[in-house]
Amino acid sequence: MTDISAIYQGKLSPLDQIRVSPLSRAYTFSDSIYEVIPYFSGKPLCFKEHLDRMTESANQMNMSVDFKSVSNDIEQLESALADLDGYIYYQISRGTDIIRSHLYQDDLEIERFGYAMPSRSSTSPISAMLCNDDRWGKCNIKSTSLLGNVLSMNKAKSLGCQEVVMHRNGFMTEAGASNVFYFNAEGTVRTSSLSENILPGITRQILINALEGTAYSVQEGNCNIEDFNTSPCMWLTSSTKGLLLLTNLIGSKYELHKNYRGFMEVSEIFESAMQSHLEA
């Protein structure tokens, strides 16, 4: 932990030296938001888009945040990822209470925290579990209120899975820490349209934009989980996963068709789009 560069309230220090009050509203109420910004060879992917999403989350949470300070914090952390792959985790809470109270004071000082983590994500396909979406109803806010995700994903872990694919009333929402795409039986790429139940993923949008006008233009809408039984290929998208195939989905009849040509071509288009974003 001593080698992980972190920042708290604008001051850099090793992560294990950060001290947060137990009355931080991030701790007592999950009254906080976060972003994970991926870096490739030291370059951030879609920095502006991540900051814009955090701004939107802050606005929906009625948090008054100085995003110039946020940008300065993240820029200070970037030196820890010079020429490296990894990510910056950044979190903003409403502040620290004098005593725990549902009703927050209007003059609380916004609490800022982040750290930089060099890492390489695995590209090996994974297993997932189909489950009901038991999360709160504002999943379009990137809040740290992730207990529903945690419980579902750890249940899946006990079955040998690394992710979940969630649904409400038989229609797919998203994965525990990713968005979900799949080919249906007709060869069309499908994903759920955005709503309050779905986080507007940055990588999700990169893929949709990249495929627009190709033979694989994405059809967004209500995705019936019965489609999974005849799908030849399902995959996840996220900032840290990129595109990650699912080998199987417990709770459905889905099984990956290995070396499925459609996904191989989609992956090539996506990689080209990613490179363009990094070079912009």
Image (tube, rainbow, N blue to C red):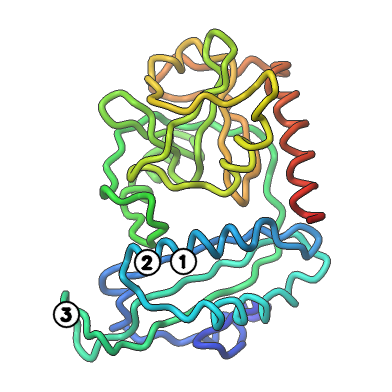
Amino acid type at circle 3 is: Ser
Q: Image height check: is 156 above or below 32? A: above
* 3 and 1 marks in contact (CB < 8 Å): no
The secondary element bearing badge 2 is classed as helix
Give percent across and percent down for residue 225: 38, 20
Which corner quadrant holds the N terminus?
bottom right
Disc 1: which residue? 55
Give the CA separation, mark 1 to mark 2.
6 Å
Q: Image height check: is 8 above or below 38? A: below
Q: Image height check: is 190 above or below 57? A: above
> Mark on residue 15?
none
Give percent across and percent down for residue 30: 31, 67
> Mark on residue 59?
2
Amino acid type at circle 1 is: Thr
Query: Considering only order in the chain, which callout, 2 or 3, is on the residue closer to the N terminus?
Result: 2
Observer-nearest of 154 and 191: 191
Give the CA separation, mark 3 to mark 2.
21 Å
* 1 and 2 marks in contact (CB < 8 Å): yes
Residue that extends furthest to the front in the rendered view of this protein: 213
Residue under the point 57% across and 26% down = 218
Residue under the point 52% across and 24% down = 219
Give the CA separation, mark 3 to mark 1.
25 Å
Disc 3: which residue? 101
Residue under the point 34% across and 82% down = 95
Residue under the point 58% across and 57% down = 49
Observer-nearest of 106 and 131: 106
Amino acid type at circle 2 is: Asn
Residue 36 sits in which quadrant? bottom right
Q: Image height check: is 66 above or below 196? A: below
- Left/right placement of residue 269 relative to residue 130 reads right
